[in-house]
Image (tube, rainbow, N blue to C red):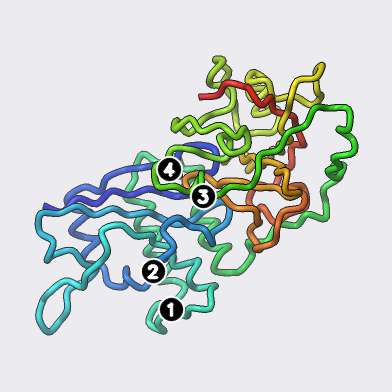
Amino acid sequence: MINLKVTLDIFSGNPNPRWELSEDKVKEFFEIRGWKDLIYSDYHAQSLGLGYRGFLLSITSTETDKIGSAKNQENKQHIPLPTTFRILGSKLNNSSNALKPSLTEENIVEKEKWLLDTNEKLDNKIKQIVIDSITNNIKSKSNMDTSKTDQKKFSIDALSNCNLYGAYYNPNFWNDPNVIYQNNCYNYAMNHRTDTFAQPGRANGCAFSLDCASVQVAANCDGVTYTCVDNNPYYIVALVVWPGGDYHWYHYHVDGFWGHKPGETAARNYDNSGNIISDPQTCDRYPYTDFCGYFLAPTNNVII
């Protein structure tokens, strides 16, 4: 018996969708050729940015000799696959590692869509987001236009009257295998490991929808605010939103740059283009197009 569990790696703040393939779909998966050519080796996605990051697949089987992506025509044996791997052909197609000529752009989209369609209960909006992302990746349209923003740029001088703190940049803490999958961007921004994939407002009974105003109100329930009060110590954080899709938070480090942790993936201090983040408002953060503002988070706030 071969079991195949799938995680759609797409969100930064919200939990990623997960499901297990039916027995028929597992059989079909191993009969489809070309999966090995779509495997992305960076399991923790340190080199991947915000938004769609492919599918994480986990295989368990009592028939290890049958784990593979397709049968070899000569000896009828399956080509071996690792037990845990990432499928992300649309990312590979834009990298320096060229795919085999037999895998056209249509082949790549077809395979990733096949995985997407194995979850019949997945929200149609999320499905459309993934389809759009696959197409955008292939067509190299993933960069965000930041020229239209009219927000004020970040200035620490404007907060000179506040008691400001900043955590030292320490990605190894967040990227530990015991931490990385249970903590998200909100945990990172608040500098608070909870192992609960913390959500804005949840500790205080506040829910939210996926727009700037709603996420701000929920975070305010946790003490996140625009202005400092008395001499309370605060972290400087920033919020962006993928309208209707997800939210994402950044933390301003004492080192002089911003860090973040996209969902279950690695913490880092660079944006989608690989540039050190000097300002979340202007960095490459597609598809989180809405910049909501800079905020102050109490260093002793409670989140879950």
Residue underneath mark 4: 181
The mark that comes first in sequence, 1 or 3, is: 1
Q: Nearer the viewer, residue 95 or 20?
A: 95
Residue 249 is left or right of residue 91, and the answer is right
Q: Earlier in the sequence, mark 4 or mark 1?
A: 1
Give the Cα distance between marks 1 and 2.
8 Å
Q: Say which element carries label 1.
A: loop
**Which residue corresponds to the image point at 62% horizontal and 22% vertical from the top-left?**
301
User: Which residue is label 2 attached to?
Assistant: 38
Q: Indicate whether 178 appears above or below 56.
A: above
How far across and down, in percent of the image, does residue 61 sit?
15, 54
| Pointer 2 local density, CA inside 10 Å: few below 14, some 14–19, many at least 20 | many
Q: Residue 171 placed where, x, y %?
A: 56, 49
Residue kind at label 3, given as amino acid type: Asn
The residue singled out by tag 1 in the image is 99
Relative to residue 37, is residue 219 depicted above or below? above
Secondary structure of residue under mark 4: loop
**Type of the residue with mark 4:** Tyr
Tell me the residue that label 3 is attached to. 172
